[in-house]
């Protein structure tokens, strides 16, 4: 069994990954607190010397640890999302880890919503949305919506650099809004950015089971939505990610369908 080190396993995404693949991979945790039933190395990702031993003998790192602090808490973002992300990649390099799965964010391109027609979508002015509307592709320039999003852009840049300079393959998953309620909340912008727990777990699983041949890959991880505006086709092409949940219409919070709709 491949040894997989998961940072931040105590969070929602870490729990989803453990439930999905825990019987097929030798999971290890790098976490601030113990994870019952999983060998856990306790350390803060902001301390390179402290976390480095956890990477010895690891085949793949799934980096989920991160702060979602607002712009008012820059020191926390700096320690965890900036220094911590660098430390994870540097510890992987020092230990010879060949591959990292990085939990990035769809917020990297969220500020396209400040312009039409995406503004109309997130405000629920659906009658003002042209059909078809432009879909934001992976190759579009980033437009982060917060300092948190800027740290995720930094993460993708570090992943690109370590792929080129040190040969560490990276899959950057721009994950949408995953919540404990596991449904799109009744807010217009949520219908365009929601990701079900099931679809998130699918993307994480595929990143371990079916990694792309390319050294560096970025893709959007979202559930299907009638009002989505981020490209999902690239993820299906490079990873086989095909979401099965749907955010639904404004009148519906969540619809499960056996056959996904054609619209991404």
Image (spheres, grey):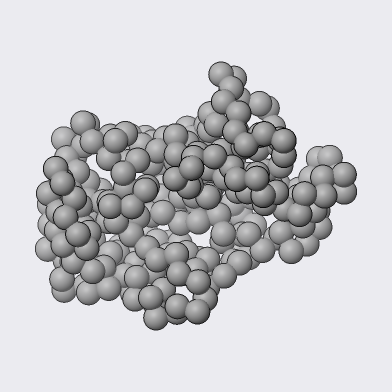
Residue at 57% of width from left, 25% of height from top? 256
Q: Quadrant of the C terminus?
A: top right
The location of residue 23, given as percent across then percent down, is: 21, 31
Asked if 227 appears above or below 141 in the picture, the reply is above
Q: Is residue 176 shown left or right of residue 6?
A: right
Name which residue lies at 53% across and 50% down: 177
Q: Is residue 172 left or right of residue 17?
A: right
Which residue: 53% across, 42% down? 195
At x 33%, y 59%, the residue is 65
Name the spot of residue 99 as percent of width and height, x first.
Answer: 29, 51
Instruction: Give the total of numbered labels.
Output: 0
**Which of 228 and 256 lies nearest the eye of the viewer?**
256
Residue 191: x percent and y percent?
Answer: 65, 44
Q: Which part of the image, by quadrant, shows the N terminus?
A: top left
- Tell which of 70 and 149 is nearer to you: 70
**Residue 181 left/right relative to 63:** right
Is residue 71 among the parts visible in the rendering? Answer: yes
Measured from the top left, where is residue 238 in percent x and y?
Answer: 49, 39
Viewer can see residue 96: no
* 227 w.r.t. 140: above or below: above
């Amino acid at each position: 069994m491949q040894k997989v080190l998961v940072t931040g396993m105590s969070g929602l995404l870490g729990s989803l990954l453990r439930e999905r693949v825990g019987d097929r991979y030798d999971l290890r945790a790098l976490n601030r607190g113990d994870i019952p039933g999983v060998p856990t190395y306790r350390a803060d990702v902001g301390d390179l010397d402290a976390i480095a031993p956890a990477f010895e003998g690891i085949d793949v790192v799934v980096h989920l640890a991160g702060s979602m602090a607002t712009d008012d808490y820059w020191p926390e973002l700096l320690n965890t999302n900036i220094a911590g992300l660098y430390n994870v990649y540097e510890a992987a390099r020092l230990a010879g880890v060949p591959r990292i799965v990085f939990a990035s964010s769809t917020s990297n391109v969220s500020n396209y919503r400040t312009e039409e027609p995406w503004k109309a979508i997130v405000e629920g002015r659906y009658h003002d949305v042209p059909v078809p509307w432009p879909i934001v592709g992976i190759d579009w320039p980033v437009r982060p919506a917060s300092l948190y999003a800027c740290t995720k852009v930094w993460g993708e840049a570090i992943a690109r650099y370590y792929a080129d300079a040190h040969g560490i393959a990276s899959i950057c998953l721009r994950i949408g809004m995953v919540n404990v309620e596991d449904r799109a909340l009744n807010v217009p912008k949520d219908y365009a950015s929601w990701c079900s727990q099931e679809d998130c777990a699918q993307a994480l699983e595929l990143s371990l089971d079916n990694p792309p041949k390319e050294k560096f890959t970025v893709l959007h991880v979202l559930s299907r939505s009638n009002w989505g505006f981020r490209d999902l086709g690239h993820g299906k092409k490079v990873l086989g990610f095909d979401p099965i949940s749907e955010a639904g219409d404004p009148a519906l919070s969540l619809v499960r369908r056996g056959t996904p709709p054609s619209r991404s």
